[in-house]
Image (cartoon, rainbow, N blue to C red):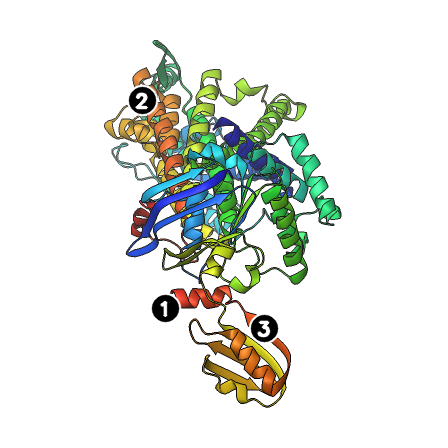
Amino acid sequence: MEVLVQLEQVSKSYEEKTAVRDLTLEIEAGSMFGLLGPNGAGKTSTIRMIVGITMPDSGKVSLFNKPWSSASLHRVGYLPEERGLYKKMKILDQLVFLGELRGLGAAEAARRAKTWCERMQIADSLHKRTEELSKGMQQKIQFIATLLHDPELIIMDEPFAGLDPVNAMLLQDTLLELRKQGNAILFSTHRMDQVEKLCDSICLINRGAAVLSGGMRDVKSRYERNRVIVHYEGQDGFLSHPAIAEYKNYAGHAEIRLKPHADAQDLLRTAAANSTITKFELVEPSLEEIFIEAVGGRADA
Amino acid sequence: MLKNTLLIAKREYVERVRSRVFRIMTVLVPIGMGAMAWLGGLGGQRMEQGVDSLAIVSDNASLAQQVQTALLSSDHPPRSVTVYAPATSADMEQVNQQVESHQINGYVLLDTAPDGIQNNPKWVSASSTDFIGGTEVHNAIITGLVRQALTARGMSDGQVDRLIHSAHVETMQVKGGKVTASDTGRSFAGAYALILVLYAAVLIYGINIARSVVEEKTSRIFEVLLSTASADELMLGKLLGVGATGLTQMAIWGALLVAFAGSQIAAAHGIHGLSSLGITKAELIFFAVFFLLGFYLYSGLAAALGSTVSAEQEVQQFSFILIAPLVVSVFMLPFVLGNPSSVASVVFSLLPPFAPIVMYMRICAQMPPWWQIGLSIGLLLASVLAMVWLAARIYRVGVLMYGKRATVPEILRWLRYS
């Protein structure tokens, strides 16, 4: 797979604060990459170095297998965390302007703007000014502006923050569609639970440094499936099984954490022998739990 | 590089020229200027009229006669001059009463001294401030006294006339190596016109460019822009775009002025085309050059100042910083026009913030050496570019700063991180 973004030992400091420390990561074409971490972990600082808004103090940033240069930015679509549009400008003019700035011809930009607006069902807002649109519609326009020039690399900083559920779903579907077409997508978020199913690869960062990174399955497989959810009827005597480290018992519903390397199957056999089991699920740890375990509860959330 | 700059300039230009503010300004300013000129004209006439009816009270009939003649043959003769000479006490009473009831503006009390030389003329009027047009009266009294003294010493009227006329000083000026008649009024008009136009342009478009910078910051669209174009491209494009808007507006006003100058209405007021407004072609070219450079310098400064703030309301706070050098230039106007080649004039005409106006004033008053004009233009150009560079740096750093207005040390520190 072609590597579109490569960061090697990248560091960036502001004043006394180290925003990013020795960060190394790679993003492949056709993949969805999640840059995850609590607020203030250094996600935005990292992204800004990729799009050239700031330069790293040390380390190397490569885009499309070449050392970073502003010429590569025509192939990148960037949606900042705090995003906006010109208030008084008509939507179509605005999209054409941003498209032209990324190397499209005016006519082509206008054509694409219309197609996208139809796809997002906001075609009637093309001739309105930004200030006349609702916030949700403005968010759609911002996505379109990011994607208009068909960038190979799409970078979105906290794209789901502040989205209404309809737009969040729309964005998610659009991103999945783009990935299928071979585009690479990098997005950051502090809501890890929202993105588990989206990401192919992740990099968990805390205090500017990578805590965990790699393919999603790879990362998860490094952590044991040590949580069990049991729905049962009858006796709860199985909860004293030696494999259990701790549990919470609600009426007919127990949440269990197993001891390391414990035998979950033996627990199931014991439970089934004494009670009626309607559900027995061995749950893999969530990203959030993995993160908390990895940083040892020292997250700067 | 160039393509992005032009794209940004185009956007700024199109958005501005389309705006309602632009249309309103284009129409309102000429109307306002016309109204001001008309009002100014009215005021001027009042001033000229000054004293329009007065009396001369004297014990010497022939002296009073001389003063009366001088008054009536002055540039702006009063409507009526009554002579009471030799005056009786009844006359005095009557004149005082006329002054009090505002039938006349006042009277000149002119009693001859025993030696005929040590006279003490007095102006008597209803109020202490009522001496507009005083110079005319003053001059007439002197002329009258001199004539009286000279004729008393045996000079003929004709001789006296010639003597007085030959003492009139004609103002001449060296232009292009030739001595020509000078019109100081015209020189002033050119300089004042530039100051007025530059002042208006800086106020309107300087603030405008600052607003546009602040809008991009508050709407946070500048982060998207900065991820495609460099801050230098953005700033230069913005300056060119807003500048082109200003020039379009000036061109419209200029065309209106030319049309007016050649029109019937103007002809009725004795103006036939631009040349009779006293503006030469060379001055027009220098006007354009210095206007443009000054405009871009101040716009760049406005952009830099705009980049330091984060809310539009704060833009008002620094409008004074923008205008201050212009105000200083205005204060220097009489000095520079009077002493165009003095050290202070030369220095100020080279210092970029003052150069646009001061150098243009010098050109109007007396053509400076070419190297000074060249140096002045060169320094201005360099400082325009420096200003764009600085504005771009501050603008870029603005991405990293949120909320509050940055202080100068903060900006300097952050500049290192961008």
Residue at screen point 48% across, 66% down: A288
Residue at 28% across / 56% down in the picture? A16
B333 left or right of A151?
A: left
Where, quadrant-wise, is the C terminus of chain B in this rendering? top left
Front position in the image: A104 or B148: A104
Labels 1 and 3 positioned on one and the same chain: yes
Q: Is residue A280 above or below residue A126?
A: below
Q: Residue at x 44, y 43 (%)?
A: A50
Q: Name the residue under label 2.
A: B375
Q: Nearer the viewer, mark 2 or mark 3?
A: 3
- What's the residue type where badge 2 is placed? Leu
Q: Name the residue under label 1.
A: A298
* Of marks 1 and 3, the one in the foreground: 3
Residue A39 x/y as whole percent: 44, 62
Q: Nearer the viewer, residue B351 or A301?
A: A301
User: Of helix, strand and loop, which one carries label 1?
Assistant: loop
Q: Distance between the residues labelled 1 and 3?
A: 29 Å
Residue A43 occupies quadrant: bottom left
Q: Which residue lies furthest to the top in this view?
A: B178
Q: Is mark 2 on a helix, strand or loop?
A: helix
Residue A226 against residue B99 in the figure, above or below: below
Q: Residue B3 in the image: x percent, y percent? A: 52, 28
**First-in-chain label (1 vs 3):** 3
**The label number, if any, that marks residue A281 in the structure image:** 3
Residue at 42% of width from left, 47% of height from top? A25
Q: Which amino acid does label 3 sit on?
A: Glu
Marks 1 and 2, Cα distance to the nearest angstrom?
Answer: 63 Å
